Amino acid sequence: MKYLFHLLIFLWTPIAYSQEVQVLYPSIGDTIAKSPEGEMAFAKHLEECDKILDKAKEMGGSDGLSKTESTLFDECLTEKEGYWDVLGMGCSWYCGGGLDTLTATSELKSYKGISYAASNAHDLSYQTAWVEGVPGYGVGESLTYHFPPENPRITQIIVVNGYIKSPKAWRNNSRVKKLKMYVNGQEFAILNLEDSRAEQFFSFDPLGYADREDWNILKRKPWWTIRFEIVEVYPGDAYDDTAITEIYFDGIDVH
């Protein structure tokens, strides 16, 4: 009976973390220079890729291509499947991760067929964004990611701040200056975001369940959550609405 009691505690006790709140600053990635005009150029480039790949196939390889054609051939092999895709082709942490569901305290109402739902913040697309739906700048509004226990552990959060789909949309809408991050309802970190169209990377010790040897036991453990609360914003030129294009993850336990 004593063993059973301790086993139940082991199975159902949620993940707990230190009460000390970290203050984190990002590493800055590449600027995301997306636009409708860029999407049209990408579509034209894909047509050129189809032609050069077909030519290489007919020749039995790329050895007979000119220098210019060979450069294009190499580029085409590493292209993303779509212009707005956050991730490139090939395997990533998302081969086993991204098993979460996502909720928000509010969402801006859809307008002219454009959605501003919470799910947009984790659809791995630069074209869509979550926009909070309360009057003012949305301070206090939040996104919550709900993870099943078998989700691979997270060591990095990547934030795409603002409405990135075009330079005008990014300037007109407000962006986040500070996010408060909670793990299982406990304050975990303050994420200080730059007012930038570049991806912003925040790293920390692994979040999630470390004991992963027995899959049956792992799957019976409680779900856990990460919540991101808007604390401060960079005001938009035209709108109070605060937008986040994407918050996605990287980590371990996949490869």
Image (spheres, helix red, strand yellow):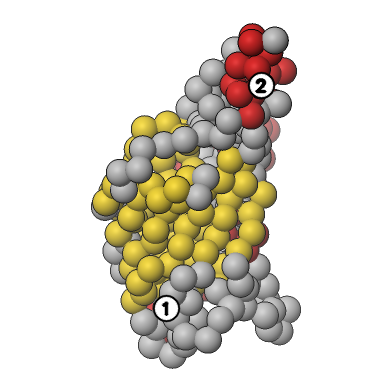
Q: Nearer the viewer, residue 15 or 212?
A: 15
Residue named by callout 2: 8
The answer to whether 190 appears left or right of 217 in the picture is: left
Q: Report helix, strand or loop for mark 1.
A: loop
- Residue 184: x and y, percent? 52, 45
Q: Nearer the viewer, residue 116 or 51?
A: 116
Instruction: List the single residue furthest toward the front.
Output: 1
Q: Quadrant of the image for the N terminus? A: top right
Give the residue displayed 54% in from the left and 18% down from the top.
211
Residue named by callout 1: 174
Numbered circle sitting on residue 19: none
Quadrant of res 7: top right
Q: Nearer the viewer, residue 98 or 8?
A: 8
Q: Nearer the viewer, residue 142 or 118?
A: 142
- Residue 98: x and y, percent? 61, 41
Task: Look at label 2 and name its amino acid.
Answer: Leu
Quadrant of res 176: bottom left
- Residue 248: x and y, percent? 51, 49
Q: Is residue 215 visible from the viewing direction of this image? A: no
The answer to whether 131 appears left or right of 19 in the picture is: right
- Within 10 Å of disc 2 (Cα), the crowding (few <14, some 14-19, many 20+) is few
Give the residue displayed 55% in from the left and 60% down from the top.
143
Q: Earlier in the sequence, mark 2 or mark 1?
A: 2
Give the residue displayed 41% in from the left and 37% down from the top.
17
- Residue 59: x and y, percent? 63, 30
Q: How many marks?
A: 2
Give the residue displayed 35% in from the left and 72% down from the top.
232
Task: Look at label 1 and name its amino acid.
Answer: Ser
Q: Report helix, strand or loop for mark 2.
A: helix
- Within 10 Å of disc 1 (Cα), the crowding (few <14, some 14-19, many 20+) is many
